[in-house]
Image (tube, rainbow, N blue to C red):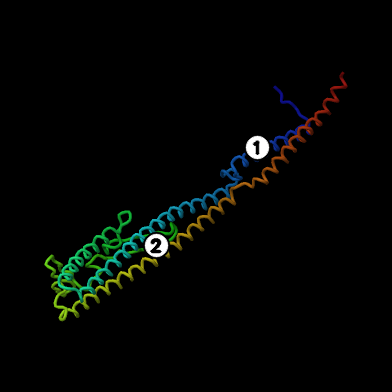
Amino acid sequence: MADLRLSAAVRNNLLSLQNTTNFINRTQDRLSTGLKVSSALDDAVAFFQAQALSNRASDLNDRKDGIDQAISTLKAANNGIEALDKTVKQLKGIATSAKTASQNEQADLTNQFQELLNQLDQIAGDSSYQGLNLLNSTASHLSVEFSTLSTSVLSVFGRNLNVSGIFSEATVVSLDAQSSLTAFGVTYSGFSSIGTTVSAVDDLIATLDSGIDKLRGAAKALGNNVTFLQTRLDFTKKYVNDLREGSDKLTLADINEEGANLVALQTRQQLGIQALAFAGQAEQSVLSLFQ
């Protein structure tokens, strides 16, 4: 069967109409998806550049979650240090009160001292977040990774801030129910014999002060790490946003522009149909010769 022969004018107008239809379909697809580049077939260079930016943003977003959790871990530890600090200050208050207390009062103060020492260990043991405790062991370690493309890592090592750790230069031996306190290398019998033990109690207070200084130093270190992590978290959030914005510039369609294009293409399509009809009129005029 022979192919149907079309005149050059009809063929050109038909080809133009087909191209216009293809453009309309592409524009409608962009309007429906919001993307001007949805696959490598649309624009291979833009597609793969956008994909690389999106992948980078996704990787950093995972790191962002890790930074956020690390901040919570350090905040939990810092809250524990604040509680420890308040408790040691109470211990100092008890020791100070013992200087002028009666013998019965001194016995009660000794029991209170013992209880608070026990609470120090409990507070340190309870200051964990997701199983990680930075206050009761120097073996604890928090590692925060900031990027997949570099070795940018923050390491925070745990501290021993229970009784033996806070007062590392002294040894808490015992504090028994007989109001006999042996602590920090000095024996206090119910805080009695004030005339001869005031200097010893002063030594005890000095030791408690050194513990408070150690806790404050640890709190400052943790606070600095929290501040840095918050800065890094804010940077990562903005960087992820920049990466996604760059990816969008390569792939997102301008809805206003595509809408205007659709109107123009539909008008062109109508004109093409009319032009195709005009081109066919020449053949119809030949047909009229035979009528």
Q: Look at mark 1 in the image and give the residue it sits on.
A: 25
**Residue 105 screen position, x and y as percent:** 18, 70
Name the residue at 68% across, 42% down: 259
Would you place residue 136 above or below residue 20 in this image?
A: below
39 relative position to 133: left or right: right
Q: Residue furthest left?
A: 178
Q: Nearer the viewer, residue 30 or 122?
A: 122
206 relative position to 47: left or right: left
Q: Marks 2 and 1, how far apart in space?
A: 50 Å
In primary-sequence order, the first of circles 2 and 1 is: 1
- Crowding around mark 1 (Cα neighbors within 10 Å: few <14, some 14 to 19, many 20+) is some
**Residue 181 screen position, x and y as percent:** 15, 70
**Residue 73 screen position, x and y as percent:** 35, 58
Q: Nearer the viewer, residue 68 or 178?
A: 178
Q: Look at mark 2 in the image and give the residue it sits on.
A: 153
User: In the rendered structure, are the residues bearing label 2 and label 1 in contact, judged by CB atoms less than 8 Å apart?
Assistant: no
User: Type of residue at label 2?
Assistant: Val
Would you place residue 160 above or below residue 62 in this image?
A: below
Helix, strand or loop status at disc 2: strand
**Residue 55 screen position, x and y as percent:** 49, 51
Would you place residue 206 above or below residue 34 in this image?
A: below
Name the residue at 19% across, 79% down: 198
